[in-house]
Each structure stands twice: as C-alpha cells, then as structure tokens.
Amino acid sequence: MQARSIQISFLEKVREQIPGGISLVNELSELLNISIDSAYRRLRGDTDLSFEEAVLISNKYGISLDLFANTKTKGLILFNYESISSRESFIAYLKGIQRELEIIKAHNGSLIYQATVLPFFYTLGSEYFTVFKYFTWCRYIQNIDAFQIAKIEQSEDYLYTKDLLNKIYRLYDQIDSVEVWTEETIDSTITQLKYYVDLGLFNDKKDLQIICEELKRLIVVLHKQTVEKKKASGASYELYMSELGLDNTYIVTRYNNTCRVYIRHLFMNTISTSNESFCEEQMANIQSTLQKSSLLSGASEKQRSNFFKKMTQKIDELMA
C-alpha cells in the first residue's frame, strides 16, 4: 500500500472514532496546531503526516500505528500496550473499552471472546459482584486493607466508575458475540474469592454469600441466552465449550474491514494489534478451536445443563 493511501486510511480510522457531528478537520487543526487548510491537505494525503503528528493522533484516538506498517509483515508486529498502574489509567482503560464497543456497535460488528477466565464484561452486570471486582482492581493498583460492600459502593470514586461499567456492560449486551469457555473458565473467579476469604479481607461473611448468589444468577442468565442463542438486547450469542485447555484469553473485534486482537497480559493489562497477518493467524487458531469444541447453543439439553450445573456446584462449595 502506498504511503498516501496508508495515511488516508489511517485518518479514516480516526474519523470512525469521533462522534457524529464533530468535524475531523477541526479536530486535526486543533490537535496538531495547524490551519484548517493544512488539515485538509493531510486528510487528502497531499501533505504527509510527520511522525510526531502521527503519534499525537494515535495517542488521542487510540489508533494503532501498525496501520503505517506493512500489515502483511510477519516478522515485525506493532502492539499497543495498555498498562494500568493508577486510578487515572484504570479510567482511561475503561473509556477505551467503551469507545471500541461503541464503534463496533455503530458498524454492526461482532466480537469473539476466547475465555480462560470469566469474561470481563460479565463482571459488570451485577450489583455486589461488580463491587467486589472493583475492589480487586483497586487493590491491584493500590493496597486496600478490607472489602466492605457498603463502604465501597457509597464512595465517590466507585459511583463514577460504576456508571462507566454499566455503559460497557450494556454495549456488550448489544453486540453479536461468540464465546469459547472451558469447564475451568469460572475457576479463577472462585479461587480469587477464596483467596480473599483466606486473607481475612471479608469483614462480613454475608458479603461473600451475596456475591455467590449473584454469581449463581449470572449462570442462570448465561444458560438462558445460550439456549435462546441471543442476549437480552436481541444480539446474537453463541457459546462453545472447549474440552481442551485454552492457551490464552483472546478478544477479536471485527467491523467493516477492520479486525483487532486483544490479548490479556498479567492481571488486567492488555496488548492489542490490527496487524493483518497476526489477526488472520489468530482467527485461524480460534476457528480451529471452535471446530474441536461443542456448540452449547446447539448441543443437547443434557450436555448444556451439565456444563452450567458444574459451575453452580463450584459456587455452592465455596458458600458451604
């Protein structure tokens, strides 16, 4: 792809990121501190973006610079790295997820989630379980001594974050999705709850019981949408069970001719890329996994029920 067409394609990705009614020309003019005419020339590809300008645009709109590289190159792949080390970076991380889901939804895109752990989005759809996950995220960022539902859910920081989390959950519910789980996908959540119990961070055991009951209700919701092959919003849903262990948690988003792969790194951090060769390779790997997995949305009632029953039993054992 020639440099001019790459630049035009890159700036078109930026256009997709900004809300309707906002002028991309004005955005570029203000961000790059250039005239409107100079912004138009960059949009048309008549004037090349400097490296510094490309970095400014990439950082503000979350557009990977791998769009400037040869997307077919296999030996060199550029990744975006989302590191979470403060409350500010946590909020920025969540807003990035919200922005990506809004774009996918606007373009009638889809999402594939290969889950070695309980998918992130399902930690947001409850009341008290969400409080617990917020606590674990904050404890990862900064040390917090004890888990108290009442204290956390009344804090100003949580109330602000809760609104953002709810928006993310509603967006995911409106996007066509395929998920791949194993029978161990929920285990890390059970282990995490048990870990905090053993540490004595639950001041009130009733809090643990409440969270476990919400988890069981989540299992019921998942069972229902698996049977109906759709989410509450009506978006399509397919759940596969892999009998083989999954090598990593991958999220693949697709809309128009855009594909992006997100890979879970450490506790919360992610790396992502739109490199064409890498995306094609990961899609091939996921398709291979799907072919070896059972489609629970179309499986026998007995197989499907056993899958969800085992998860519920694990939660009951934790509550005992």
Image: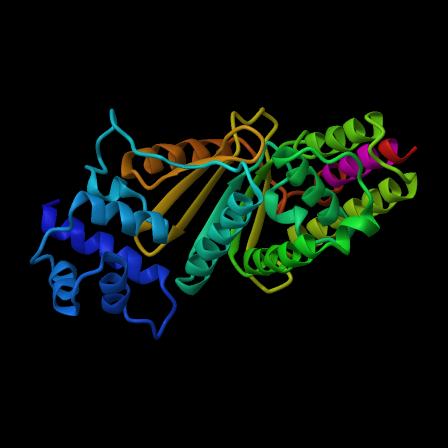
Residue drawn at the location 53% of the way across and 33% of the way down = 249
Is 121 or 60 nearer to us in this picture? 60
The magenta stretch spans which residues? 307-317
Give x and y (percent) for residue 195: 77, 27
Residue drawn at the location 28% of the way across and 64% of the way down = 27
Is residue 315 within the magenta segment? yes
What secondary structure do most residues of the magenta stretch adopt?
helix
- Residue 217: tell me if it is visible: no
Q: In this view, does 319 lie to the left or right of 308?
A: right
Q: In this view, does 37 lie to the left or right of 220?
A: left
Q: In which quarter of the image is the N terminus?
A: top left
Is 226 or 54 nearer to us in this picture? 54
Is residue 128 within the magenta segment? no
Give x and y (percent) for residue 34: 18, 61
On the image, which quarter does residue 302 sit in? top right
Q: In this view, does 39 lie to the left or right of 148?
A: left
Is 215 or 312 nearer to us in this picture? 215
Q: Quadrant of the C terminus?
A: top right
Give x and y (percent) for residue 227: 67, 52
Residue drawn at the location 57% of the way across and 56% of the way down = 168
Marks counted in the figure total 0
Single out the residue that lies furthest toward the left: 46
Q: In this view, does 5 lie to the left or right of 205?
A: left
- Residue 11: tell me if it is visible: yes
Give x and y (percent) for residue 70: 19, 37
- 114 to 98, vertically: above or below: above
